[in-house]
Image (cartoon, coloured by chain):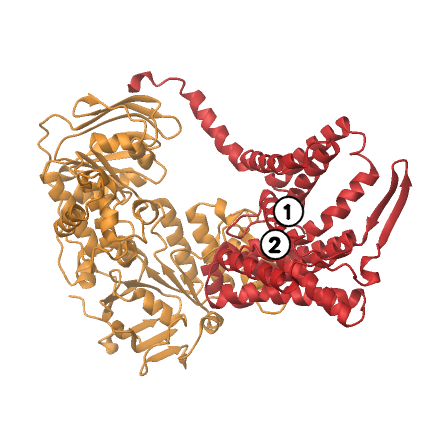
Chain colours: A orange, B red
Amino acid sequence: MHTPIHSQPGDIDPGPWLLRLEHVSKRFGGVQALDDIAFNVRPGEVLCLAGENGCGKSTLIKTVSGVHAPEPGAVMQWDGQDMLGIDPARARELGIQVIWQDLALFPEMSVAENIAFERNLGRRPRLVKTAAMRAQAAEILDSLGVNIDLDARVASLSIANRQLVAIARALIANARLVFMDEPTASLSRHETEALIDIVRRLSAQGIAVVFVSHRLAEVLDICSRVTVLRDGCYVGTYSTEGMTQSRLTELMTGRQFDYRTRPAPTGDGEPRLSVRGLTRQGEYRDIDLDIRPGEIVGLTGRLGAGRTELALSLFGMRRPERGQILLDGRPLRMTSNRDAIRAGIAYVSEDRLSLGLVQQQAIADNIAITVLGRLLNRAGLLSPRRQTGLVADWIRRLKVKVGSPQDPVSSLSGGNQQRIVLAKWLATEPRLLILDSPTVGVDVGARAGIFEIVAELAAQGMAILLISDETPEVYFNADRVLHMRDGRLVESFIPAHTELERIEEAVHA
Amino acid sequence: MRKFLPRLGSTELWLIAVIAVICGGLALTTDTFLTLVNLLDLLNYSAVNVIFAAGLLVVLVAGGIDISFAVAASVVQYLVATTLLSLGGGGWVLGFALSIGFGALLGAFNAALIHHFRIISIVVTIATFNLFFGLLMFFTDGVSIYNLPDWLVERVVLFEHETANGWAELTLPVAVMAVVVLATWLLLRRLNLGRQLFAMGDNPEAARRLGIGIAKMHYLAYGWLGACAGIAGLMQMHYAQEVVPNALYGRELDVLAAVVLGGARLGGGRGTLLGAVLGLALIAITQNGLNLLGISPYAFRMIVGAIILIAICMSGETLDVLRTRLARRRAAPRQEVLS
């Protein structure tokens, strides 16, 4: 049994804390964002801050970095000294750096200038010291053991390299505590490993790292302790030794989930989707693929293996050069995704925030946008009554938590936004549903909810292609797992008959 | 070290190539284009626009836009002229000081509205464009000022040379243009404040988190453009030897088009002075050439508009997109199996 370390101060070396927070609360209007939080970091340790979306992690980071001031009564100490009342500039002076998920870089500027931009700050006019900036940037990249062209525009870098630039920028300011907010969310497994190496290197240099991630395996792998928050409250701080993913999930959500694979597929019935010899140069080649009604087929592989490109071709958005796509035995000729939608194919995109939803528009409008043609009344105008009916139906069926269907989508949490995307596509009554990385940025509890829905849809006879680069996700939620590498399908696994480790090895070897 | 300076970008190279072709064509088809007299005239005439463009580039780079600067320059002309006349004359020093001061004030007015009321810059400056121009026409009744002080209307010749085609002259506005361009270059490329402007235009949220003073940056950008507009107004007044209230009306769009043609991005973070100057040069040379070729001035706008469209469509990035698309089509000549 894991007991919170915090509640038993005698159990641990009280040691010198780098950062010590006690009784930190924060209220925004009527919302209690943080309620009596304790949070302690030792010099040079790698600590995880875990919790579902909206649990108060961001508020806590902003409080430590001086953006928000806590309610009176809080204790905040840095190196044993009182640090209440700091502002962001002072926090940076102390050595507190935050790498936000959006990285906050300047895409049009060079790598060197991004890393050493602090030298450009200040309110008085001063000459830019280009040579010194370059030298400083080169030195810090060297110390990280990475090699990035100093003159490259940041916009031209991969996400992983941008991350490294952001880390380098944090370190240049003599950071002693670095918060990393979801640093691995858009990295491939390989890039994640490289990042974890860097985190270890920082830790060895005595720089403490607070890691925020939804990927629990990663958290347990890299961190020595984990502090869990739930609904703005402090749950506890635990050693990661002996901690399991399911236990951590339980602590974060306050609920229990069981991880079991789906039963082995029976393998009868005509395929809903058949793909033969599909090829598009430089993206994927010779793809053969069958999905039967009611079957969930997982597609995994490293980033850049061609998964998303294949999905876009199945959705009519990238024309293959050779090969055949058959839906219910009939060849499909698609010139755009409108043909795909008409044929009964729905695609939930990887990047739901920018591609899947119109953030400022009402929830109801977002759901109805794919089926506007069916909502017309006799005069050919949009029928508000039909729309309200449709929207209410889907909100109920997918258990979306909304205030009002007229609220903007941006007011919803990540998990609920993902449900709205699903609703929007399910409203087209698809026969084939393609889900591309449906849980990116969605927390554990909400993930389980989404996969419950997916399983239900399969049970009703829908054919589902589930794409994800998180192997466990496809392992636990698909009937069959296909492994894609360098544009080809190289292997097929049945989770019920295969160990997860075996698939992970194959994918990441 | 010129590592932070942009290496000559594709936009600049492309513009240089187009300008070279046009110049070559004009040199072959007209006798007058490639003469010192004509080229220096072109420079004298374009100086005012280049001064405007330098200021506008600062605002564009910082992520804003300004429609009001040309009529603001007209307002400054009136304010400067009437102040000078009421003071009994003055001189160049006072003239520049007043122009820069009034110009910066009008720019600061825009900045204040944009920053403190959080209104987007295009809306603010369309409103102030109308406000400035309306006030000007109302208070002046559209009457021009001709009795400017002597020092202001006397031509200041910096260089002259007699050629077969007449006197070739380089005048004061060109020198002022050079100073303004140099100062703007210094600001944008060499000073920390200029880098902060770029940063704000590139990623405003990141700039805010780094603690860059957003208010100060707004005042700097619009104030700089205002000051440039004031100087441009003074030079235009000097060049034209009169103040006509609607003389600069409409100039804002010409300058804006030229600066965007030169690679400045609407939305901020990207733009170079060289590009802006080349963009202006392309348009000025085209107009000059059409003039020399005896083409009706009514055709100018049409042709200039077409050139801007063609140039932007053919710019480096657009060509890259077309090239990959073409390559893909070649790789897949037919889609017989798909049907």
Front residue (pair A263, B219) = B219
Query: Callout 2 environment at 10 Å: few (<14), some (14 to 19), or many (20+)?
Result: many
Which residue is most to the bottom?
A73
Q: Is residue A316 left or right of residue A148?
A: left
Residue picked out by circle 2: B56
> What type is the residue that disc 1 sits on?
Ala
Image position, residue B330 (x, y; %) = 45, 21
Q: Earlier in the sequence, mark 2 or mark 1?
A: 2
- In the displayed structure, B87 sits above or below B201; it is below
Do the residues under discs 2 and 1 have CB atoms within 8 angstroms? yes
Q: Is residue A335 visible?
A: yes
How far apart are labels 2 and 1 at the CA level? Answer: 9 Å
Q: Residue flagged by tag 2: what amino acid is it? A: Leu
Instruction: Name the secondary structure under disc 1.
Output: helix
Q: Residue drawn 27% across and 44% down?
A: A437
- Res A466 seen here: no
Disc 1 marks which residue? B276
